[in-house]
Amino acid sequence: MTLTNHPFDSLNTNGRSFREHPKVVLTIGGADPTGGAGIQADLKTFQHFGVHGLSIVTAVTVQNTSGVISTNSVSAELVHAQLAALANDIKIEAIKIGMLTTADVVRVVAEFIAAQNVPTVLDPIIASSNGVRFLDEDAIEILKEQLLPLSTIVTPNLPEAEVLTGLTIVTDDSIIHASLRLHDMGAKAMLIKGGHSEGEESRDLFYDGLGIEWISAPRSIRQAHGTGCLLSSAIASCLAKQLPLRHSVLAAKEFITSMLDRAMPLGSGQEIFQYPPLALN
Ligand code: PXL
């Protein structure tokens, strides 16, 4: 039995060729017209990891590389309809949650995650890096109560970890303290990203309720747009491929570290990640 040239063709143990079904990952988040963050960046990351990306949009943002100008939320009803249409049709292996907006949208997403019961990465985005608010104040409470305990891992940066825990985070000890607080709040595992702190290394804290581990990489001088989106969608891709959680986090950290060298200026503001073109044969 000869293989055809299709990249998804494999041989099974009987030597027969079969076409492998791609793993499917869903991202739930905002649309970023620059392609650097949000669901556009997630889809490119999924492609890079060889999984098929589904995407449902929670908000349309108006932005360019200089920053977010405004956002417009999609209604909770429309978010629900998008999720239901996909789930009725396609088996989803993992989910990444990015930009959410209102308390009602967070409730709809939490209900969906509870029903799907697949590995879920929660990137708890509250505002854009230039300070435009994404997540409503009352939605933060619903996210903490309903979504945090349902997620396989939550990936806050330091300002987000401060909002979620109510703690001031400056020192390593305070990051550890925040991780224990998040665990008490129901988070099963977390990667608290140190990208907003100083120092030669970019150090993230990984805690899965068992052991605390610092994951370090050389700090890049580059400040690219969408770093958190790439990291969380890379973790979701690896979880869809059934890699263990710690493995998935390490692979995602390695990926984002290598991608930082690939960021390029497209406009007058932040740099945008560039993916290598697909090698077609
Ligand atoms: O990087 C966080 C983020 C996520 N999702 C969308 C965004 C941003 C930042 O601007 O626009 C849609």
Image: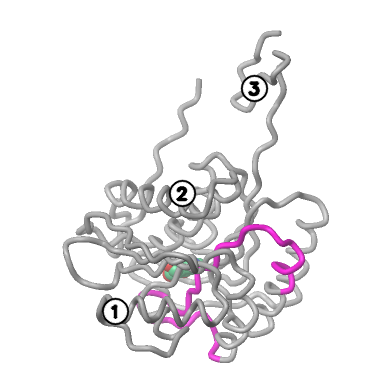
Above or below 153: residue 274: above
User: The residue under label 2 is which amino acid type?
Assistant: His
Give me the C-alpha separation between circle 2 and circle 3: 25 Å
Look at the image and say whether residue 200 sits in the magenta stretch: no
Q: Residue at x 35, y 48 (%)?
A: 254
Residue 142's quadrant in the figure? bottom right
Q: Is residue 199 left or right of residue 60?
A: left
Q: Amino acid at mark 3?
A: Ser
Earlier residue among tags 2 and 3: 3
- Marks 1 and 3 sit apart, C-alpha to C-alpha, by 49 Å
- Dot 1 or dot 3: first in sequence order is 3
Coordinates of residue 47 in the picture (x, y in percent)? 53, 43
Q: Amino acid at mark 1?
A: Asp
Q: Is mark 3 within 8 Å of ligand 1?
A: no
Residue 89: image x %, image y %?
Answer: 81, 51
Image-quadrant location for residue 3 = top right
* Secondary structure state at the residue bearing disc 1: helix
Read off the residue under disc 2. 247
Tag in front: 1 or 3 = 1
Mark 2 against mark 3, which lies toward the viewer? 2
The residue under the point 74% across, 73% down is 111
Report which residue position mark 3 lands on: 10
Tell which residue pokes out farthest to the top in this image.
Answer: 1
Q: Is residue 206 left or right of residue 47?
A: left
| Residue 269: image location, x then y, percent | 29, 65
Q: Marks 1 and 3: CB-CB under 8 Å?
A: no
Residues in magenta, as a range: 111-137
